[in-house]
Amino acid sequence: MTSTNLKKILVLGSGMVAPPCIEYLARNLNNYITVACRTLASAEKLAAGFPRTHPIVLDASSEADLDKHISAHDVVISLIPYTYHAAVIKSALKSGTHVVTTSYVSDAIRELDDAAKKAGITVLNEVGVDPGVDHLYAIKKIDEVHAKGGKVLEFYSYCGGLPAPDCADNPLGFKFSWSPRGAFLSQRNSARYLRNGSVEEIPSEELMATAAPYYVMDGYDFVAYPNRDSVPFQSFYGIPEAHTVIRGSLRYMGNPAFVHALEKLGWLEPGRKEWLKDGMTWAQIQQRAIAASGSDESSLISRIQEVARFPTEAESQRIIAGLKWMGIFSSEPATIVGGNLLDTLCARLEKLIRFAPGERDLVMLQHKFVVEWAGGEKETFTSTLELLGDPDRYSAMALSVGVTCGIATQLLMDGHPALHKPGVLAPYTRDMCDPIRELLEKEGVKMVEAKA
């Protein structure tokens, strides 16, 4: 590691959140940044836009590659898939290099806490938007309520990365600015949350069916469903008094029902299908997946209605029209990807459902707090982020994740006492959240607090 004021920062990955992260860090003249990708062309393209930034090739699946490059830096920011994070941390332990990720603290990461403390390194996680920005404002409001003698009885937090309403012009009401596979799989998680003092669980196959209308503000038609495991946040956020804690996702009306239909029709299956062969048409694949009597449109529609069991005729017509728009009934040969239905569909949708030049995305995040004061009166408060992307600069998702990560990394490099301490960390305390939040607001990412 360096012994001067110069800081060497390694950024793994060149995806959409990397540019605003690097731009923020490149403002500091003491920072020297290395961008590492699997292909040199990707790294060169990203590095070319920033001062004191140079590209390298790195294979994250190679322990030797990780060891070689991580050891030459003060901090490594892992913006590659979360499945690689544990390997990155294990490499960083050898050289005493700090680690930053925007991902949740997984079990694999948590298991490295003692090792990180012994090595004297900080492993800072959950500094994106969700998780990340959500923590900053949840902790702020909860701390303020407690300071005034109040109790947070109910806590709700819902976030969505979506196209702006005027760009949601396809049957899914969604556009992919990142991996379609990841987006679909996130809608197939099981969920666990606390409601009225009881832990409730939803199996993955039922999650989309639980989506219900959820009002955030005028002008939006959202539905919401719980996401992952909300129960630990009663402890993480320091609200043992809360009888309801639910964190979840927002989508536009109609999206979860469409995704649920795709699931029933087999299209979200990640497992390899031996019968899935090059040369099969989209209609033949759908016929085989649902055991339809034929691959003609009428046979497929008849079987789809049996399998999907749509609640109304209008919903049946809407989703079948959407499937037709996607080409599911087509006699066109499909390009088989990964030997499975999920990747094959995702490759098609990646071309069909993407942001066109000039279109904007939207990050919508809202907390709702039901508070009981010492005198027994109750009030409801909200904190809301409505962030639209800039087609000429960054998407809302890229900015909110990337700049949050950049700020947290800079604070760590500057030796901020709340962030520069050994072990596996996430921003669940006021001393960690406030400095990140105050700098983030200067970058135009701010939740607006109100009384409901």
Image (tube, grey):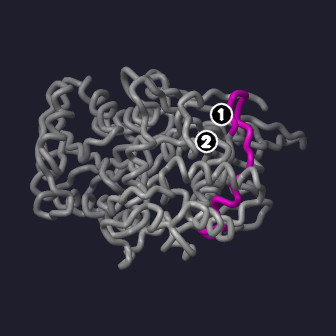
Relative vertical location of residue 142 with respect to residue 109 in this rendering, above or below:
above
* Relative side of 398 to 251, left or right: left
How busy is the neighbourhood of tag 2: few (under 14 within 10 Å), some, or many (20 plus)? Answer: many
* Relative side of 420 to 226, left or right: left
Q: Residue at x 72, y 52 (%)?
A: 315
Report, in whole angstroms, how far the alpha carbon at label 1 lies from the one at label 2.
8 Å
* Whether residue 5 is visible: no
**Which kind of residue does numbered mark 1 sit on?**
Ser
Q: Nearer the viewer, residue 334 or 184?
A: 334
Q: How many marks?
A: 2
The mark closer to the camera, 1 or 2, is 1
Q: Nearer the viewer, residue 28 or 305?
A: 305
Q: Which residue is mark 1?
A: 383
How busy is the neighbourhood of tag 1: few (under 14 within 10 Å), some, or many (20 plus)? Answer: many
For this orientation, the residue located farthest to the right is 376
Estimate the x, y position of residue 262 in percent, counting from the top left.
56, 60
**Which kind of residue does numbered mark 2 sit on?**
Ala
Q: Which segment is the magenta one? A: 202-221
Estimate the x, y position of residue 160 in percent, counting from the top left.
56, 42
Q: Is residue 241 magenta?
A: no
Sequence-wise first label, 1 or 2: 2
Q: Quadrant of the C terminus?
A: top right
Relative vertical location of residue 294 with respect to residue 410 in this rendering, above or below:
below
Q: Nearer the viewer, residue 360 or 152?
A: 360
SS category of the residue bearing label 2:
helix
In the picture, residue 2 is in which quadrant?
A: top left
Q: Is residue 215 magenta?
A: yes
Q: Which residue is mark 2?
A: 138
Relative vertical location of residue 144 with respect to residue 426 in this rendering, above or below:
above
* Whether residue 387 is visible: yes
Estimate the x, y position of residue 157 in percent, counting from the top left.
64, 46
